Image (cartoon, rainbow, N blue to C red):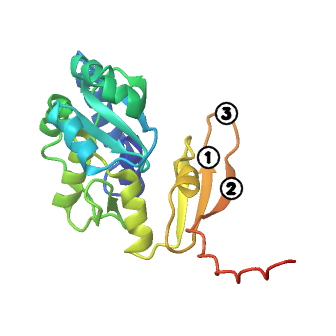
Amino acid sequence: VGCSLGDSARTIASGAISYEIMLKGLYLFNREAKKITGGGIVRVRKNTSDVNDEDVAEIESLGLTLAVHQTPRHFLVSGPVELLERWATAPATMTEFSIKPLYDAPLHSSYMYPAFRAVEAAYSDTRLSQWTIPLVSAAHRRVISTEAELRNDIEVNMTSSVRWWQTYCWMAEELGAERFINVGPASTLMRFAERIPLSRPVLVEDISVHFGSNARTRARSWRTPPAPRSPTSPSAPTS
């Protein structure tokens, strides 16, 4: 399972597409994305509680996209800069959320469709090979079974919301995954292990790859909710 560039790396590692074809596709996508002006994406943290359906509905009603659900309180919002600024500077938003600029493109939103359509047209005749490892969609929270589903997953990873932390919880709780390995420069799953409770223990291993340095491996048990405390007997009165 992956998100953004991680989704591309996952597809290559599975054998579904070659490194060369994916690299050319990403180059084309990036080239076309630079033509999409006036957009951006911001990093957001809700200060006092988890994000709820009302928060998502309000953001989307403004023409913005909750682009990536990172944790129950951390997420990315994408869209036109004018709309982002209007939402970010509203008094209610400034009270409830902490916001930082991230990138000057409306990533993971429908505003990226022109770039995706260019890639789709260039590679319309390219067939995907049968992948050799299980693939999971972080957009739909499902195991990918067909070429059509994989193509759709590549599309939605570029142009719509990704349910990142919900997918990992679903894999642990519903699919019964017992071990996760984080590969890449960011220790995303290690942060999940710190912030998101599960109903049972899951092992998370981190293989952080940095250019010019050796990979390092860490392991941590994904924390589970604390066990309920046994009621204590009332103390005997003292004289």
Circle on res. 208 = 1
Q: Quadrant of residue 59?
A: top left
Q: Is residue 171 left or right of residue 199?
A: left
Q: Quick check: can you spot residue 43?
A: no
Distance between mark 2 and mark 1 Cα atoms:
9 Å
Q: Quick check: can you spot residue 176?
A: yes
Q: Amino acid at mark 3?
A: Gly
Dot 3: element: loop
Q: Nearer the viewer, mark 3 or mark 1?
A: 1
Distance between mark 3 and mark 1 Cα atoms:
12 Å
First in sequence, mark 2 or 1: give its number.
1
Q: Amino acid at mark 2?
A: Arg
Q: Nearer the viewer, residue 160 or 201?
A: 201
Circle on res. 218 = 2
Q: Quadrant of residue 213?
A: top right
Q: Is residue 29 left or right of residue 47?
A: left
Q: Are marks 2 and 1 in contact (CB under 8 Å)?
A: yes
Tell me residue 187's x, y (percent). Answer: 57, 46
